[in-house]
Amino acid sequence: MVQFSSSAARASLDAAFAALADATRRGVLEHLAHGDASISVLADRFHMTPTGMKKHVGVLEAAGLVTTEKLGRVRTCKLGPGRLESETAWLENYRRLWDARFDALERLVRELQHRETKGDSTDGNE
């Protein structure tokens, strides 16, 4: 089981999931996966003000998912160093847990069905 015992690791995980919780921010990441973009381009793409987009980008930047660079009057955004590795490990841990639970449930259902079928074939009263 992956442990996230340090407060820094938990804070990083919280920041990434908080950033990913918003559809606009996920859209920004998808857009940046195809190439860098300015705040203005992103704001136009998502039909919002540059100030509003700058706030979204700031959340992504704080989570390490986006970096920005200002050249003159243009702030360019690109995917950051955060590769979601610890977030993926955290999710994978719970995916395995749920898989094990569903597998156990499936075994129980099969066992109950088998018992029911066995009981029906030996019960000649019906």
Image (cartoon, helix red, strand yellow):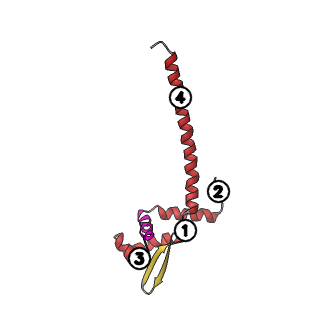
- Tell me the SS state at disc 4: helix
**Gap between marks 3 and 4, in whole Å?**
59 Å
**Gap between marks 4 and 2, in whole Å?**
36 Å
**Placement of 2 over or under 66, stated as above or below:** above
Question: What is the span of residues highlighted in magenta in the rendered image?
Answer: 23-39
Amino acid type at image mark 3:
Ile
**Placement of 33 over or under 2, stated as above or below:** below
Q: Residue at x 63, y 63 (%)?
A: 7
Amino acid type at image mark 2:
Gln
**What secondary structure do most residues of the magenta stretch adopt?**
helix
Q: Earlier in the sequence, mark 2 or mark 1?
A: 2
Q: Earlier in the sequence, mark 1 or mark 3?
A: 3
- Tell me the SS state at disc 1: loop
Q: Earlier in the sequence, mark 1 or mark 4?
A: 1
**Gap between marks 2 and 3, in whole Å?**
36 Å
Residue 39: mark: 3
Q: In the figure, is residue 114 to the left or right of 56? A: right
Q: Earlier in the sequence, mark 3 or mark 4?
A: 3
